[in-house]
């Protein structure tokens, strides 16, 4: 059996297996799988180049299901490719199974988790950027997209960036099955509406009947043969295709078929076609030259340097030492100082323009291929990509983030530009590390530590220059802290982070003048927090003031309280944070107004010290 | 002076005032203001209908600066309109001034805060939706957009939704000044690239020279005269226009001019033109009929009902009682149950498709006009719009949010669909209220409470059915809690929320069997948390177990710890939460695996009770 007939049969097999998987699970999205079955049959059998025995092969193509809910189809493909057996297929959605409700990299052939719509294509752009500009490898990136997810702005960030960067090895396969979860999409079967938009965005667009396997084959050939711009195959398909009870009917989204046995019969019964998926060509990935030895910038104690600038300098040094470090920025590289990396390593810097979602997605895509991306923008604007960061954790991605312009200390620009919720948001990311240095040498050390850190790590930097207080090379382990003032008989402990460390030091001076001895801790590692040092301080002083340039919820104060949750004896803790909505003003004025400056700290510490 | 000459003069005045404001502040964005000065001069003098003495006039047009950093231009417009005096103009960016670095509604003529790019247009879409579909008023919405922000996907969500809903009273004015913060935009001065995209998206697009005041005037006329679709005026402009030292030069973004005096001279000096802005026509807004009396749904104790369903029923009832309640959903209304509102009040339901950013922005836009929007999607997908929620707080918006499918208790769909960071994210929104009911009657009461609540309130609902434990009408004030088990000699307190309340009750039964008396608190108001009740429990039992279907950071546990920060005597607190990355499985299996089910709670309570 060859060509048309074989593809049609394979498509039916994928439908049958999708129905079976969902039936076994008692949930799932068979109808959304059935619409795309022919598209995927022809891809698997005719165009994908992938070594299922060697998912780490750098030359493998990448297949991403942006419509992650079509996971039954993806897993049916894996069965057809011989990668999983039938028993595993039927473990779909069961506790412990790798075949989760939506794909995740617990399966070695899955690059990234999908299931939050509108993310797979932007990540695919990242993988394709890596292929073209970093790996210099000819792998292709195939992304199966739903029509519903075309409503997500992130898809259009991806379309725009892909054509701008001429990713002609990227193919978006749009499964236009007309029906969303509750109703028809905005454009229904008007494939022209999509094609017109895509062409305007610089893509080559091909409209086809998504159940005509020969047309599908031809479209893939055309995509592969198209130079200079990415191709979108806009395929008119039928949701639930092949089974009358569900075919093209609203209200059939996301549920198993009522009568799977009848559906399987209608689809022609169980099949066991096996596809020998074409292996990729063998080629060695490009690597950038690297010095090997890391020479971090060194700053002199007493100088005033913005931590954001130290970030840029350290990142540039890291790039010199290690060839797989790359940087991305959201068109604020002269604010985040990632421009220093860009100047030193222009080939490894990616300008993502003001598209934070695409920036994070691109970073996720690059780490799929083993690159070590650092992505930066204002801390406030990382919130724009919060869903992407959340999903990056589900993807088990290694991702380094830097958010500049933290807190009210930025001054005049006002609250829209102030990161005041970033510590809370990033702490609540699975497995994350959250760092907030107060001086330039500390920043440099933490950038180096992030490079070695798996999972998602976040560095929060300051707009304004702060005094360098640590000698170059002072160890700053993740999970550590620095005790800056301490005596044998401290009466109160002040825990600060970032700009408030300097306020805390000043406060300690004020307090000393008034005869109160304050321990000062720089809790630069907000997550994981240095519980040991905090517990020692609690035992020594039993009174703690935390102070942060952040809303009161979810940041440093909450992290410190968590460390003391069942500590005996429990210290009294007073949290200072930004509680009113700030306006514009000078940094010092705003710190004062927010009640997180030296004077406010000293007042709180005095009041606390006076309690029994 | 009339027409061309007057507009040109007014444009120069706006430039001069922008330069002066930034010079007085020592910061700000004069060059980004200068490019759009002519566009705004003609709008103010010829087309805007706005009563500056009565900003609450329902018939006023709306002018939104999506490029909020051009605030000097906006404030210069206000001066030209006689709304502020010169002294106030020069208070720009100073502590206490209403003229913040980026516009905020501290100024009565500003609808919403901008400054996070890509948000003003989506909010404008919301205002325009209100005008067309709710107010039935002929006000126009004018949105000044930057070219850099066209990289944000949210802009394309807005373009798509505006044409789909035929908002021909919405005009987007694109100030294509070519230069972003650090470099040329992707498309530079290729206004055709934008026009082509916009036309493909169903907009009427007009390309003009943005410094030709007659062409600008004509374009506005054409926009006003265009029926059935919104108009975009794609204006080629020059950044820093009028001052050679900065005109069309890279590196001049976001800083005051080096020599403002020379610049003002070059611009022809100070002017004091005053514009008598045209008043809007007087018309009475449409109001929907309303019953007045709220009849909440009533659920029988012992029945099992999903709180998401109770949300939908309560919202429908609220809509019957009050005509200004509206609902929006991100194409999951049969999951969130906002479909019950849609069925009862189709004229006040807005399907926003899978575009969460636009959904939140539309809600913000509607509340500008006094409507009371409830916006719903999966809790996990609200993270997609986190930057919009953050900015809604800066906008002082009254916004009600509902996130369904909280936590691992959703079961088989897996982690991409599980809201596990929403409590942390929403707690860290300025002035927010965070509610998480465990039963249907409680949900109904909280929906009613949210309707009366200013600011941003968030309701987290459950996918699965939970037993009704509260009789209908049980008061559930924001900031309250329910003590479900209590005796005079409790040994330990369990604080749960949502699904874990039921696990806590079961755990209390297990504990009772083992001779341990547990107090059980339902902390349905996570923010503000009921400190009084928690302190009483701490005093009574001195041992607290918190348990939540959420990551350990920033949620219930942290809120409870915060309540005890300086409590004496301090209780020992053990936090149970989801710490490992979940997969798929049955709800009960996942609760068990996460260590937040009854057994885990009982074990933790037993261990805690045994501590000294």
Image (spheres, coloured by chain):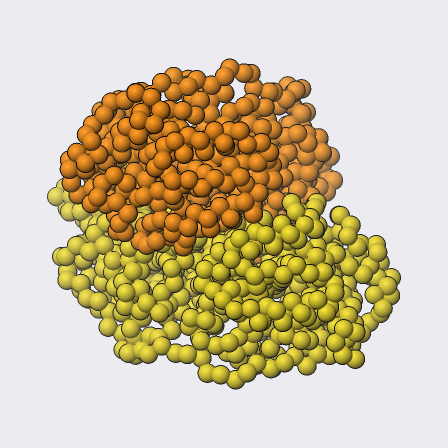
Chain colours: A orange, B yellow
Position of residue A591 measured from the top left corner of the image (x, y, whole percent): 62, 56
Screen quadrant of the N terminus of chain A: top left
Q: Nearer the viewer, residue B433 or A502?
A: B433
- Residue A50 showing in the rendered view: yes
| Residue A80 relative to residue A358: left or right | left
**Which residue is found at the position 24% from the left and 22% from the top?**
A272
Position of residue A140 measured from the top left corner of the image (x, y, whole percent): 50, 27
| Residue A570 relative to residue B189: left or right | left
Q: Nearer the viewer, residue B537 or A606?
A: B537
Q: Nearer the viewer, residue B320 or A399?
A: B320
Screen quadrant of the C terminus of chain A: bottom left
Position of residue A317 measured from the top left corner of the image (x, y, whole percent): 67, 28
Q: Above or below — where is A575 with respect to A12? A: below
Q: Nearer the viewer, residue A567 or A161?
A: A161
**Which residue is found at the position 33% from the left and 79% from the top?**
B289
- Residue A430 showing in the rendered view: no
Q: Above or below — where is A221 with respect to A184? A: above
**Which residue is found at the position 19% from the left and 36% from the top?**
A266
């Amino acid at each position: 059996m060859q060509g048309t007939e074989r593809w049609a049969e394979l498509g039916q097999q994928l439908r049958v297996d999708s129905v079976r998987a969902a039936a076994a699970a008692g949930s799932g999205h068979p109808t959304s799988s059935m619409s795309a079955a022919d598209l995927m049959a022809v891809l698997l059998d005719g165009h994908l180049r992938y070594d299922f025995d060697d998912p780490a092969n750098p030359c493998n193509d990448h297949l991403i299901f942006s419509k992650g809910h079509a996971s039954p189809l993806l897993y049916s493909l894996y069965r057809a490719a011989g990668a999983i057996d039938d028993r595993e297929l039927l473990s779909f959605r069961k506790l412990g199974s790798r075949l989760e409700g939506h794909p995740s990299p617990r399966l070695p052939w899955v690059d990234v988790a999908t299931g939050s719509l509108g993310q797979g294509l932007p990540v695919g752009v990242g993988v394709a950027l890596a292929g073209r500009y970093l790996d210099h490898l000819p792998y292709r990136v195939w992304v199966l997209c739903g029509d519903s997810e075309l409503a997500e702005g992130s898809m259009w960030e991806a379309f725009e960036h892909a054509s701008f960067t001429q990713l002609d090895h990227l193919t978006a396969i749009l499964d236009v099955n007309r029906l969303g979860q509750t109703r028809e999409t905005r454009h229904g079967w008007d494939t022209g509406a999509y094609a017109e938009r895509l062409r305007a965005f610089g893509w080559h667009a091909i409209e086809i009947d998504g159940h005509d396997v020969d047309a599908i084959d031809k479209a893939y050939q055309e995509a592969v043969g198209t130079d200079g711009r990415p191709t979108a195959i806009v395929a008119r398909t039928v949701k639930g295709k092949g089974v009358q009870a569900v075919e093209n009917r609203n209200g059939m989204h996301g549920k198993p078929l009522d009568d799977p046995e009848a559906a399987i019969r209608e689809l022609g019964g169980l099949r066991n076609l096996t596809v020998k998926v074409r292996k990729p060509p063998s080629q060695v990935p490009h690597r950038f030259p690297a010095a090997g030895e890391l020479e971090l910038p060194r700053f002199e104690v007493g100088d005033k340097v913005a931590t954001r600038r130290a970030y840029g300098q350290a990142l540039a040094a890291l790039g010199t030492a290690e060839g797989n470090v790359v940087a991305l920025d959201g068109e604020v590289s002269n604010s985040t100082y990632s421009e220093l990396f860009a100047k030193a390593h222009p080939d490894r810097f990616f300008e993502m323009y003001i598209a934070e979602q695409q920036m994070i997605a691109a970073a996720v895509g690059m780490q799929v291929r083993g690159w070590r991306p650092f992505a930066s923008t204002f801390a406030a604007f990382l919130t724009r990509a919060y869903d992407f960061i959340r999903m990056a954790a589900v993807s088990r991605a290694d991702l380094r983030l830097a958010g500049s312009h933290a807190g009210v200390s930025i001054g005049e620009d006002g609250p829209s530009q102030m990161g005041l919720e970033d510590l809370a948001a990033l702490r609540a990311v699975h497995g994350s590390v959250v760092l907030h240095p107060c001086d330039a040498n500390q920043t440099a050390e933490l950038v180096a530590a992030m490079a070695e850190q798996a999972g998602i790590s976040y560095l929060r930097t300051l707009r304004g220059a702060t005094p360098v207080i640590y000698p170059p090379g002072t160890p700053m382990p993740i999970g550590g802290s620095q005790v800056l003032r301490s005596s044998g008989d401290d009466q109160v402990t002040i825990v600060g982070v970032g700009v408030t460390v300097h306020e805390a030091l000043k406060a300690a001076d004020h307090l000393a003048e008034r005869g109160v001895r304050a321990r000062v801790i720089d809790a630069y590692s907000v997550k994981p927090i240095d519980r040991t040092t905090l517990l020692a301080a609690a035992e020594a002083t039993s009174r703690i003031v935390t102070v942060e340039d952040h809303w009161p919820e979810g940041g440093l104060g909450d992290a410190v309280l968590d460390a003391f949750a069942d500590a005996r004896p429990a210290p009294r803790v007073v949290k200072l944070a930004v509680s009113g909505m700030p306006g514009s003003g000078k940094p010092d004025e705003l710190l004062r107004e927010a009640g997180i400056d030296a004077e406010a700290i000293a007042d709180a510490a005095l009041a606390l010290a006076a309690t029994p």
